[in-house]
Image (tube, coloured by chain):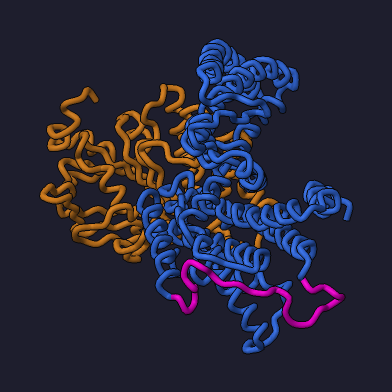
Chain colours: A blue, B orange
Amino acid sequence: MINFFKSFSTWIIIAVIAAILPLIFDSSFSLTLLSKMGVLIIFTVAYNMLLGQGGMLSFGHAIYFGLAGYASIHILNGIGEETLPYFPTVLFPFIGAIVGLFFGSLVGYVSTRRAGTAFAMISLGFCEMVTAMTLIFVIFFNGEDGIQTDRMVGPEPFGITFGPQIEIYYLILFWCLVAVALMYIITKTPFGRMSNAVRDNPERAAFIGYSVRRVRWQAFALSSMFAGAAGSLHALNYEHIGFESVSVVQSGAVLFMAFIGGAGHFLGPIVGAIGLTYLDSTLADVTEAWLLYLGLTFSGIVMFAPGGLAGLIVMHGPIARTDKKLLISLIKPYCLAISSVITGLIGLIGIIEMLYFRSLISKGEGEVVIFWTEFNANGIMSWLIFIALILVGIFLSKKTFPLAKESWDHAISVVKTEISNE
Amino acid sequence: MNNALQLKNVSKSFGEAKIIKNLNLEIKKNERHAIIGPNGAGKSTLFHLISGHYKLTSGKITLNNDEINNLEPHEINRKGLARSFQVTNIFPKMSVYENIRCGILWSMGFKYSIVRLVNGDKKLNEKTYSILEEINLKHCAHIPAGLLSYADQRALEIGITIAGGADTLMLDEPTAGMSNSETERAVNLIKQISEKRTLVVVEHDMGVVFDLADRISVLVYGEIIATDTPKKIRENKAVQEAYLGTEDH
């Protein structure tokens, strides 16, 4: 029993923190935000079974998320109108999971015959197809309006109606923990290991007795199943589902979260889902250019840190294990490099904000607030300040980056000699 | 019939080009059989045909009297044939330990399970370590395979090849690019692992071939011009003309 708690201690701590969070941040905004995070964590980790664990880039995984959502809403409405028998709200993720598994097995059977670019294209094609169907089959999808529902149906065991947001939050939290734990355990099964093997070297995997296609198909179906469970919770959370939930936009969002967080590591997508959901809800109110920043961040991660945020942390693991002092010696060059990047970014953000301001607001007004400071977008001075910041940032980066790289190379060479001496 | 592998009238064309022409070959159980031939003779193509990587244009291949020429690579592997590749073919991001463990999974009946865990499995663990010991890589079990030296990566690949318990092994140029001492180590390893197994090996290093093989087949332009013991191959006029004559052996 003690061992059990030891090996699960991290999970238990996270669960307890997540359970306490809504008591501290009890505004309706934070409750909605936390609920959304929970749903998207399940969806992103599920998506990463494909991208990170199985090496399959899908542009259409929202299909299973969205279709499960539609199914859940119809069933809720059916129960509400008493055309369908009662089904406990708590168990709704099972409905989503079954819907996701069904469509995932179907589409996966076709699309996993091919890997790489062909797979990605097929996934995109299916996504466009389903999105188009939402506008054609109005009876089921109700076009652009989507469908409303009322989640307060049936009996109320222990007085739980799932009306208040806090009750939905705890429902989402419970299923989030269960789903993430299950997906984590799956990475430790023969299937999970072979999924990684197929990702790294499909040819080799075939010659040790595994059907590459079968492994990919299974990964696809399971990933869709968990995405479906997330879709059900999404529907319960909003009491509404619309065509955008099956669209390429939603598929792209989950790709961004998994990739920026770090597809190569199990925790990466969780970090990505929490971080991007938070920024999406807060930054979107502050700046019109939020999507531009998101795109730039994504491009930056693809180019400079393909392992995502988690990858950046994990790559320092061997250094920390070899010698803590080595890790500490990296802090100073890193801080210098980061602050020069930030200087340049402040300049860039200033320019972007003023450009957006100029293009959106009538020419007469010039006062724009950037970083809590008022600038005059019509005056030459503000532009010069930000351009100067960009130039200073670039100049400093040229000095500090080689320094940081040198320190990193030194540290990693020490680690390599340590390993070969063992 | 004590043939491990039998090829009957096997042909393979890529468009107009006939790479393998009506080839017949018998590999006896538990023999070490080397296939030699000049560059472009079709040795690697032949390996790809037997292991299911390419489909035959015509002909028939049997493994332990089972027809295998219409099967997928993983199905052929399950019937007891394992192979290595000319270019090192391992799982570079996984640890050495895990490379071997993946090679064992199917043969121990783990299949595609999502309800069994691999980490706590004692038998699997023991089997993995026994193979690591066989290929002398136990000391670096938990290093990412991509960080191993070239010779160690080749040894690891042989380890993956034997891990599934196949009784017929096919090694494609196992000593290519190795130094003399590394080659010697590799040959000893190959001798040791092929003791109770059938071995088919493609190799350019004639020293290795004549040291290792019980019988040798000479492949020239998609046809086998001779199959015999090393001594007789050395004396064979046609072989000398076609192949050995150009090198000093």
Q: Is residue A88 above or below residue A270?
A: below
Give the camera-side residue of A6 and B214.
Answer: A6
> Does residue A31 appear to the left or right of B236 in the view shown?
right
Outermost residue on the right side: it is A2
Q: Is residue A141 magenta?
A: yes
Quarter-wise, where is residue A83 in the image?
A: bottom right
For image coordinates 19% across by 30% down, the residue present is B244
> Does residue B107 appear to the left or right of B223 in the view shown?
right
Picture coordinates of residue B152, whole percent (x, y) = 51, 31
Q: Is residue A153 magenta?
A: yes
For the magenta stretch, what is the residue range?
Answer: A138-162
Q: Quadrant of the N terminus of chain A?
A: bottom right
For image coordinates 46% across by 26% down, the residue present is B182
Q: Is residue A292 above or below residue A387?
A: below
Picture coordinates of residue A100, whole percent (x, y) = 55, 68
For image coordinates 13% across by 37% down, the residue present is B238
Give the camera-side residue of B38 and A98.
Answer: A98
Picture coordinates of residue B184, whole percent (x, y) = 44, 27
Picture coordinates of residue A344, whole percent (x, y) = 56, 20
